Amino acid sequence: MIFTIHRGANEIGGSCVEVCTEKNRIILDIGMPLMNKDGSSFDSSVIKDLSIDEMIKEKILPNIPALYKKTRDKETAIIISHSHQDHYGLIDFVDNDIPVYLGKASHKLIELTAVFGGRKPVIKKPIYITSYEIFTFGDIEITPYFMDHACCDAYAFLLKGEGKTIFYSGDFRGHGRKWRSFNKFLHIAPKNVDYMLMEGTSISRSNRRFETEEQLEEQFIKTFKDTKGINFVYVSGQNIDRLVTIFRACRRCKKLFVMDFYIANVLFELAELGFGVPYPSRNFPEVKVFNPTLLTKRIQNLNRNDLIDRFAQFNIDYEEINEQAKNIVMTIRSSMAHEIKKIKKLKGATLIYSMWEGYKDNSYTKKFLNDIVKSGATINTIHTSGHADNYTLKKMYNAVLPKMLIPIHTVDADKYQELFIEAVVNQVIDGETIGNENKDTSLLTALEEIGKVYEKSGILPKTENDKILDTVQQYLNIICNKLKINEVQAVLFGNMVNIFDGYEIPLKSIADFIGCKPIKLINYIDDLKILDDKKLIKINNYTEPEEWQNIMTFNIAINTLTDLKDNKVPDTEKENKKIIRFPKK
Ligand SMILES: [Zn+2]
């Protein structure tokens, strides 16, 4: 079983992983990108006029031809981890004969998003998954694990096939309302996993623990109590955990929770599926519904009045909202400037911003928030991430202890090795296929032969042997590419070796000089990539005659090869005392 991250190896959003055996193919998520390659935010309207081929060329759609054709080289299925656009948003372009595995609630939420966006729901062949219930697709066995995430129906997956196992974390956290599910996962986590693809959306932040939804509940209560006028909450309609948090705070403060009919529909559908969420009904008398002008017009034009009318008996009008302003917590978004105008008194009102700060960069949102401040309301932020903090990432890693850890859904792939010192981290690039490393061994075998000659005679092969140098160069390119270090960094260690030529130097001294821990020096190539620039400059002052660099390049290649081949885990105590003997010229 092999896999390819088509998008997400060094990016948040647009996740897509292709897993293949000889006979079958599974696509884990097919997300809409959140950003362009230059880091600016992705505008999904640009794809409207593009053909499938153009979208593949523009690297928007993953280059997996089987997804867009009626005939396929192997049986293919899609698995959607959860109902966030950056995990399913490109499904509209996929051939609709391909079966799609996903949670029932996720499917409902995806359908609602389509309906409210004026699009037709496209998943024709949904197959519903249940947490911990193993299913198979051809020769691949899949176990879904229910995860704690901001939306309500998110999964991680274990895939087994052809003797290999891959664990895909999807999006997760441990500080949400479903933290118990995360704890349960820690107890039953799969073992002997070959490859673990773990999200790291928040890995760049500090090591502090993220606030829990319970803590947020207390903050909402405090703000509700302190506010003299109406409370607006700026919140995503699909952040189910947050909506529950706000509802609970409302109930405890005896406030009315006034939501637009989009949010009402989301909660209603989830309640129908058995989720314990508040929704407009007799059971939740504090939940009221309002009909925002623009949204109402749009839904009426789509002839879907049923989505509005089903909450008629729980509607609240502006007269009542104005009368009871002090007792009201009302959901709001930047498309609701009309609604704000209908509120008579904004002085003393509070808008609680309860989303990711980055969304404020949107010019539309910025203007909306500025206008509300000009009207006399104050803005308060109460929010916690939908993604795991470092503490939780470590818990998941330690529960699974995979043979190889692969960063995904992150812009900080290089932080993984720092956080998981003892892990074998493989930073891949989009489009790189993993799992078939053993197939092309010719280069390694050739170098091994050269290595043997070197070990026996202690003589480096002559530099004028271009063929050997070419081979070494090729190998070095692979190392640099794999470990994301540049050739200069790799050659630096070679320079070190040359400085101490003919001397016996304790490993620790070399480590100190280079500025790294001895344990890391054992796998020195691995280590060089985390040396910071200043330390590198210090060593870089020593310049090599050009032809020496070739020799050292070779030296590094040989040493790395030995390290990689042995794949040893060094014993720190022993290794500290170890002497490195550099060969005399
Ligand atoms: Zn998500």
Image: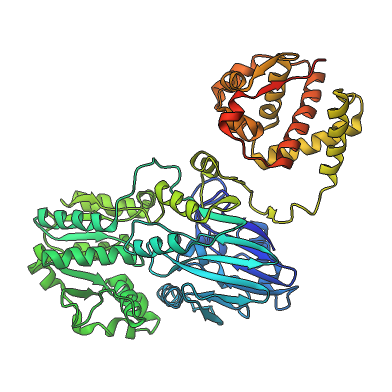
| Nearer to the camera, 294 or 84 | 84
Residue at position x 7%, y 68% in the image: 323
Instruction: Give the colouring mode of the picture.
Output: rainbow
Residue at position x 54%, y 70% in the image: 143
Q: Position of residue 259 (x, y in %)?
A: 24, 70
* Count of marks overlaid on the render: 0
| Nearer to the camera, 357 or 419 | 419
Find ligand 1 in the image and state its quadrant.
bottom left
Q: Quadrant of the C terminus?
A: top right
Residue 65 in the image: above or below residue 437:
below
Residue 316 in the image: above or below residue 494:
below
Q: Position of residue 431 (x, y in %)?
A: 67, 54
| Nearer to the camera, 356 or 524 | 524
Q: Quadrant of the N terminus?
A: bottom right
Q: Position of residue 247 (x, y in %)?
A: 22, 67
Residue at position x 36%, y 78% in the image: 299
Q: Image quadrant of residue 314?
A: bottom left
Q: Is residue 140 left or right of residue 464?
A: left
Residue 120 in the image: above or below residue 450:
below
Q: Position of residue 239 (x, y in %)?
A: 34, 64
Residue 61 visible? The answer is: no
Residue 252 visible? The answer is: yes
Q: Is residue 257 left or right of residue 492?
A: left
Q: Is residue 384 left or right of residue 6?
A: left
